[in-house]
Image (cartoon, rainbow, N blue to C red):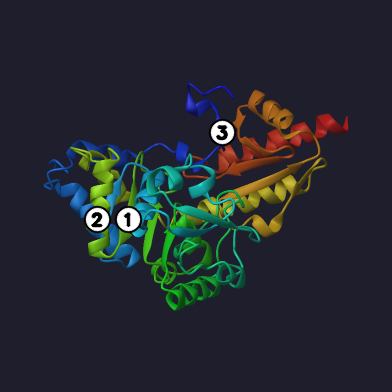
Amino acid sequence: MSIPADQAKFVDLRSDTVTRPSAEMYEAMATAPLGDDVLGDEPTVAQLEALAAKTVGKEAAMFVPSGTMGNQIAMATHCDRGDAVLIEEEAHMVYYEVGGPGVIANVVTWTLPSDKGVMAPEVVEKHVLKQNLHTPGTTLLCLENTHNRAGGTITPLSILQDYRSIATQHGMRVHLDGARVFNASVGLGVDIKEITQHVDTVNFCLSKGLRAPVGSLLCGPSDFIEKARIWRKRLGGGMRQAGILAACGIISLTKMVDRLADDHRRARSIAQAISELPGFAIDWDRVQTNMVLVLTDAPAPEVQAKLEDQGILCFPVAANRLRLVLHADIDDEKLDRAITAFQEIAVSRVS
């Protein structure tokens, strides 16, 4: 796929990571008070971390360059070498983080099947191991909410409560890869703390639907975050005048959360329009937040190429499946352009 040189000419549905900072974010970057975060005197980073911890109901938070780093730091901080970790089989932490659990934390990942990204609690409990001479002990349960590869699906609150009960019973900790957890809270219509209360630690991204250019927050108990800072330094994640980036994150948390509902609305709109076209189908059970998985009669790469010719960018995620991701830079006009492109492809195939 070619990379667009002029974003304004394209409707970019590849990911919500492609968003550009708002004008207010650019101004905040220019005026943010700065220090040196590695030396511990970065005032804007400190402000963002305090805001993040309060927002998700945890004692402390740590600003990291990426969600991948935050997740892998969390696993390394929670676990000892050789521990067993339970995680969904297509979770981002095992599927898209380049073997991080084995390389960084040196843990055994026990991957479990799911229904649209949600593991059955009884399956989770069945796979808990007690450490002995022959088996590793299961010390961590990792969750993903919303679930990327499942199409932005939400884990129900009742299931999260079940996970928490299982973990408490067996002495495990729970980490949430909450890259898009604010999409989950908006989708459920609940405060974010209704989700995060069930986990020990949570990592969420500022650089997806929340529109910041860079950064994620790892949140949890104060003593955990202090240990995590050692891992961040060890992995090269210590940043200096990071307040330039943190300033955008403050705007993300204070002004960009409620607008996620617009992304969800537009996802349903384009899904509805595409579902009415010959040659395409929608798995409606997965249209829960800002992602749409489009089933194609023709090979997905072929459809992708035709869309790109019309200025619509997206990714094929299977032989006959495209993924569309709605975000802050897709307004109703761009949405209509994308729908028109699908309609024209459908007409050309019929004719």
Residue 129, how many percent across, how many down? 51, 67
Q: Which residue position holds label 2?
A: 227
The CA distance from mark 3 to mark 2 is 42 Å
The CA distance from mark 1 to mark 2 is 7 Å
**Residue at left offset 72%, top offset 31%:** 303
Compared to 17, does 116 lie above or below? Answer: below
**Label 1: which secondary element:** helix
Tell me the quadrant of the picture where the C terminus can be found.
top right
Residue 78, how many percent across, how many down? 35, 59
Q: Is residue 345 visible?
A: yes
Cβ atoms at labels 3 and 1 below 8 Å apart: no
Q: Is residue 84 left or right of residue 116?
A: left
Type of amino acid under label 3: Val
Type of amino acid under label 1: Thr
Numbered circle sitting on residue 77: 1
Taking depth in this image into account, of 77 and 2 the one nearest to the observer is: 77
Image depth: mark 3 or mark 1 in front: 1
Q: Residues within 10 Å of mark 2 (few under 14, many from 20)?
A: some
**Label 3: which secondary element:** strand
Residue 337, how many percent across, how many down? 63, 35
Tell me the quadrant of the picture where the N terminus can be found.
top right
Q: Residues within 10 Å of mark 3 (few under 14, many from 20)?
A: many
Residue 111 falls in which quadrant of the image?
A: bottom right
Taking depth in this image into account, of 89 and 25 the one nearest to the observer is: 89
Q: Earlier in the sequence, mark 3 or mark 2?
A: 3
The CA distance from mark 3 to mark 1 is 40 Å
Numbered circle sitting on residue 11: 3
Type of amino acid under label 2: Lys
Cβ atoms at labels 1 and 2 below 8 Å apart: yes
Q: Is residue 230 left or right of residue 15?
A: left
Residue 284, how many percent across, how many down? 70, 57
